[in-house]
Image (cartoon, rainbow, N blue to C red):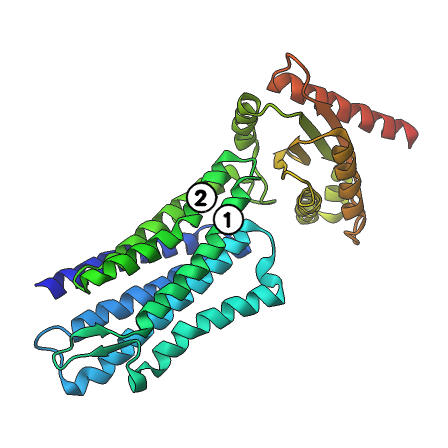
Amino acid sequence: MISALYAEVYLVCFTVVALMLYWVKRGDFRSKAYKLLSKLFIAVLFNFGANLMFTVSTSPGLYSPETSLVSYALKTIYHVSLATMVLLWAYYAESEERSGLMNMKAPRNMVFTLISIPIASALINPFTHWLFELGPNGEYRRGPMFQVEMAVLLFITCFAAVRLIMRVRSEPDPVRSRYLKVIASFPLSILAAWVLSFMGETVPVICVSIMVELLCIFMGTVRLSIALDPLTGVNNRQNLKSYVEHVLRTTPEEIYVLMMDIDKFKHINDTYGHLAGDEALVRVAQAIKDACGEMRKRPYIARYGGDEFVIVAQSEDSEMNALCRRIDDNLSKCGEPFALRVSIGSAKLGEGMDGEQLFAAADSALYSIKNARRSAE
């Protein structure tokens, strides 16, 4: 009866994760982060599926010495996929943290060295039984390496989670900030599974906790996708409005708005086609994101509409001037087939100004600059 309930819980969790994977695959998710999320879901499905089949294979009436090799293989797949799942989550967390840490040799080697411990333990376990063993009737018994495995997995997830929490402190967007906190809660599922594992295998804690965590992450990606411009990957105008209301209500620091317009964008569309125009928008968005990445406090970037972009930043005059120079420098490196340049209008929040007045001031500065450039040509 207990094994049947255990299998049913795993089957439900497997089905929920499979549905999430289906919708991620069907969605217009092309970024590196979403590709990692898909791989994470696949690893989870292997993990849940292996443990589900293991539970069936060791149930009374089915387990025998002749089928023990199959049961050992299924539980080995479970442990290997658990470690793989944690590794993929660490990469996913790093991609959302956006520091490029996992591209550095030393941190990457450290993570791979640590994750190789539980994977190697699982692969050699049929000969050593250090990680687990099966009793005469298929009873699952944990070995001493199980505690080492859980400690390693918890360390890796906590290390990545702490970095995400630190990143939250400089994240200007409250929607994204909440999403990063959800991702950072993943170690709690590993910790809960470890602590409650002492109750025995009759309680399928780890699959439920991981499924709930992934469901929260999935809902967060859906919320973020609604707030993002699908072409450029920056925030859309609808999310910009709610962010400005939030920042004016909660931030006492100096607020700047930069409004940008791509010079001769119509000429690019007419000469090279609309696909080239889309490519120009993507290049400009990336140049802005790269330039903003060097700032002390990360600004908020949005596509305002058409070929217009907006930056909302909490900063000072010298840093904003340096930001404009970096954007120009980044665009000058974009190369062929067309040159890219933006006009930038800047406005600083003044006493008694509201959001509409701040944007109107930036918009006025932008068109003054564009008119001056047209007159000079």
Q: Residue furthest right?
A: 376
Which amino acid, mark 2? Answer: Lys
Which secondary structure lies at badge 2? helix
Residue 269 in sight from this viewpoint: yes
- The percent coordinates of residue 42 (x first, y second) are 38, 63
Residue plotted at (11% across, 63% down): 2
Residue 85 in sight from this viewpoint: no
Tell me the quarter of the image containing the C terminus: top right
| The quadrant where residue 376 appears | top right
Residue plotted at (23% across, 67% down): 52
Q: Residues within 10 Å of mark 2 (few under 14, many from 20)?
A: some
Q: In this picture, is 116 found above or below 198?
A: below
| The quadrant where residue 75 appears | bottom left
Which amino acid, mark 1? Answer: Leu
Residue marked by disc 2: 181
Do labels 1 and 2 touch, CB within 8 Å?
A: yes
- The percent coordinates of residue 346 (x first, y second) are 74, 27
- The percent coordinates of residue 231 (x first, y second) are 59, 45
Residue marked by disc 1: 164
Tell me the quarter of the image containing the N terminus: bottom left
Q: Residues within 10 Å of mark 1 (few under 14, many from 20)?
A: many
Q: Which mark is residue 182?
A: none
